[in-house]
């Protein structure tokens, strides 16, 4: 029996070009989560644009000031994590359940902070994965499949080695190390259809704009849309809610161990 399969997308940094991504997602019936900070060193969505985006898509937190959490003190990291949740909720009127660390950088202490702040899921920058969200420390960690960016073997190898995810790298090698990210996206989406799992496309709209990747993105989203009749397209938050029972189940052995220790 084939495992369930889902599609999701996410887009980081809150650049005004996110509205162009949103238009393409709407065109092809694909869900998306936009991780928006209050400010970055690039242009960011205005309050009006953010509300417009939030009317049709999920908004996730991306810290207040797009900081690398591993390069600031813990008290600053906490303010950025919990403050960005409040900021998103204040501007959208909708609960913010997902967090994405800028640049994909975080440590164990930040996972604890994200959980304590009340988030359900944390999106990582692990590449080439078709895994469902993974329970860890009371959170669901979401890996990704393909970034809308022309990475090569060196980048994929570095990403896999850093995360001890060599099985993901092997998936890329088996498919002949495609040079074009849209080709890789179609191949891995086909793998998800056959074997089950989560296909997660992500990117930065400003990068897509700078590198003139709009037509490639249109092609990939069109392909995803052609499969939407058989593969549910969900937001990151919806994906986490679907797999929240896994997190509850993973907590049970730890609770049982603590209870047994208390009785002893």
Image (cartoon, rainbow, N blue to C red):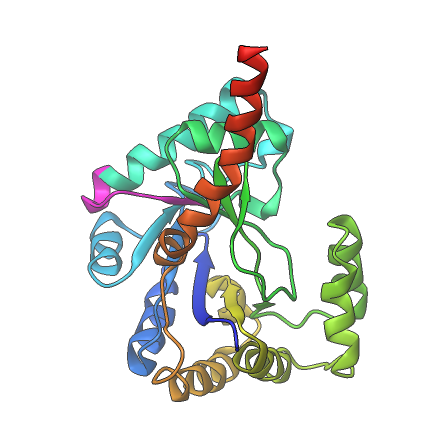
User: Residue 48, percent across and down?
Assistant: 20, 53
Q: Which residue occupies 46% across, 65% down?
A: 205
The quadrant of the picture occupied by the C terminus is: top right
- Indicate whether 135 appears above or below 200: above
Q: Which residue occupies 59% across, 20% down?
A: 73
Residue 186 inside the magenta-drawn segment: no
Q: Is residue 191 left or right of residue 38?
A: right
User: Residue 183, percent across and down?
Assistant: 62, 85
Magenta stretch: give its range.
90-99
Residue 227, quarter of picture: bottom left
Residue 218, quarter of picture: bottom left
Q: Which residue occupies 58% across, 61% down?
A: 131
User: Residue 230, percent across and down?
Assistant: 38, 83
Q: Is residue 203 left or right of residue 161?
A: left
**Residue 182 seen in render:** yes
**Looking at the image, which is closer to me, 239 or 245?**
245
């Amino acid at each position: 029996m084939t495992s369930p399969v889902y599609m999701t997308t996410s887009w980081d940094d809150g650049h005004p070009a996110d509205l162009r991504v949103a238009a393409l997602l709407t065109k092809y019936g694909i869900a998306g989560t936009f991780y928006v900070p209050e400010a970055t060193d690039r242009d960011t969505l205005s309050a009006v644009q953010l509300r417009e985006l939030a009317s049709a898509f999920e908004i996730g937190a991306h810290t207040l000031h797009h900081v690398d959490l591993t390069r600031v003190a813990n008290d600053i990291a906490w303010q950025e994590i919990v403050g960005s949740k409040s900021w998103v909720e204040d501007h959208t009127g909708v609960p913010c359940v997902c967090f994405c660390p800028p640049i994909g950088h975080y440590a164990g202490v930040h996972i604890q902070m994200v959980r304590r702040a009340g988030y359900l899921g944390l999106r990582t920058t692990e590449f080439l994965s078709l895994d469902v969200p993974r329970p860890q420390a009371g959170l669901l960690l979401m890996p990704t499949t393909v970034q809308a960016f022309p990475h090569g073997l060196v980048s994929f190898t570095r990403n896999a080695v850093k995360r001890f995810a060599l099985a993901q790298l092997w998936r890329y090698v088996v498919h002949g190390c495609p040079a074009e990210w849209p080709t890789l996206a179609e191949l891995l989406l086909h793998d998800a259809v056959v074997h089950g799992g989560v296909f997660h496309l992500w990117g930065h709209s400003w990068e897509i704009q700078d590198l003139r990747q709009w037509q490639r993105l249109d092609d990939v989203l069109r392909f995803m849309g052609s499969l939407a009749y058989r593969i549910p397209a969900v937001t990151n938050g919806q994906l986490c809610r679907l797999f929240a029972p896994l997190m509850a189940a993973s907590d049970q052995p730890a609770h049982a161990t603590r209870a047994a220790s208390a009785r002893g």
